[in-house]
Amino acid sequence: MTDDMPEITDDAESASGPVPVLAIVGRPNVGKSTLVNRIIGRRAAVVEDRPGVTRDRVSYDATWSGRSFTVVDTGGWDPDARGLARSIADQAEVAVSLADAVLFVVDAGVGITDSDEAVVRILRKSGKPVVLAANKVDDQRAEAEAYGLWNLGLGEPMPVSALHGRGTGDLLDAVLAALPETPPETFGEVGGPRRIAIVGKPNVGKSSLLNKLAGAERVVVDNVAGTTVDPVDELIELGGETWRFIDTAGIRKRVKEASGQEYYASLRTTTAIDRAEVAVLVLDGSQTVSEQDMRIIQTIRDSGRAMVIAFNKWDLVDEERRYYLGREIERDLVQVQWAPRINVTARTGWHVDRLVPALEKALEGWETRISTGALNTFLGRLVSEHPHPVRGGKQPRIMFATQPSTAPPTFVLFTSGKLDASYERYIERRLREQFGFVGTPIVLQQRPREKRKR
């Protein structure tokens, strides 16, 4: 890690005391997300060489010189924008209002534009400390051009190259000087809010659901598919408990088939599932369960995360559609019958309150542990009632079993020979009937006894 690359932490709760917030704002395509990645020391914000890739305000945790702070990336800010661009600009204004200081990013090569001057007027009204970053200063000649930004009246412009890291150390020193002091960084705190990833294909209403849960327009929502690109974390209090929700970009293609912005957005979604404890799969109840939906289900199962299935847009589901949806659930969702299912309308908030009980059930199942004694008593009774079929003159037996871990519940079966896949499925089904395991995949591992050499 270079001198100009800060350390990062994965949990905002790792720092004691209130962590100051830095909002990063600027016109579209001035390099804000590239600068965010440089500040936090990893490629987390989606970056592509065209405007409008970042649309929501997205938070990341970073430290510099032993001090922690939160970085909030925002969409390109054009005060005169309309439509979706207006929503993005509104998110940037919210970010400024919530921040302790602002990092205003300007393209030094382009110079001062009318939009930059309009943003400066808004920043002055906010009364927040502002650090001016003159980005895309890759050499000494460009550095001389950057000093023309003194005319913005925000003080000394800090020349920086987000792409190459030039000048980021000095920039971060200026940022720390603008942010309020915090207690020194401490590590090792365990726990924190339960982590919930909201996943699904584009335009099924994931962001609408998050906004309804948060009780505010937290995420840009538009009926154009693919509005969300970066995962967005939001702490929301529901049912007397705080939850960390992660809104994600819709998964359109397999990661290896996607390219550019879509590739990194898909990668972020997979990472969001891995970060979470429960994945809420949002399906459009008015549409047929698709191959994309099935692929996301498989991604969640492979990750070993608990799962809740939310059929959204239920106000559009008539009697005929309910009949066919029931058939699709029996046919396509047979492998995840253990996942709690709820019907909601995120737009109006109808039955959204049913999500918390479903999450609690899924987490309870995900963390269920069976004692070794109870497990082997259960399996002994199961084998005596329904022994494994004889294959090639041999009949494998389960000699002993244990559950070494939870989240997801994982069982190791010590056997006299390899069990059939169908018998494994039978064991899993009986485990669920006996012990519940609602909302969680079950992992069964076999340890066949090695043949003794003569």
Image (cartoon, helix red, strand yellow):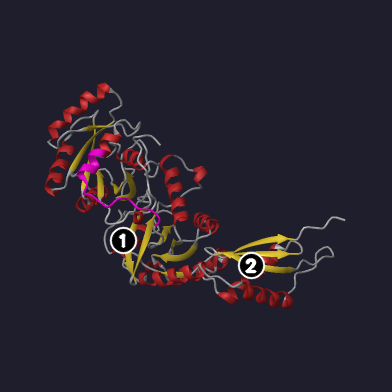
Does the magenta segment cover residue 155? Answer: no
- Whole-percent x, y for residue 342 in the image: 43, 70
Between residue 34 and residue 287, name the one nearer to us.
34
Query: Relative to 448, is 372 above or below?
Result: below
Quadrant into which the N terminus falls: top left
The front one of 236 and 400 is 400
Q: CB atoms at circles 2 and 1 under 8 Å apart?
A: no
> Looking at the image, which is closer to me, 14 or 56?
14
**Residue bounds of the magenta highlight:** 173-188
As shown in the figure, which amino acid type bears the numbered disc 1? Asn
Whether 181 is among the magenta residues is yes
| Quarter of the figure that contains the C terminus | bottom right
Residue 178 in which image quadrant:
top left
Please tell me how crowded label 1 is: few (under 14), some (14-19), or many (20+) other residues with Cα within 10 Å: many
From the top left corner, tell me how far across and down residue 52 is, in percent. Answer: 31, 42
Location of mark 2 (residue): 402
Q: Is residue 401 above or below residue 50?
A: below
Amino acid type indicated by mark 2: Thr
Report which quarter residue 132 is drawn in.
top left
The local crowd at label 2, few if under 14, some if 14 to 19, many if 20 or more residues have their Cα within 10 Å, is some
Residue that carries the numbered disc 1 in the rendered image: 211
Q: State the residue at coordinates (80%, 64%).
A: 391
Q: Is residue 289 left or right of residue 216?
A: right
Residue 26 seen by the camera: no
Q: Is residue 162 left or right of residue 93?
A: right
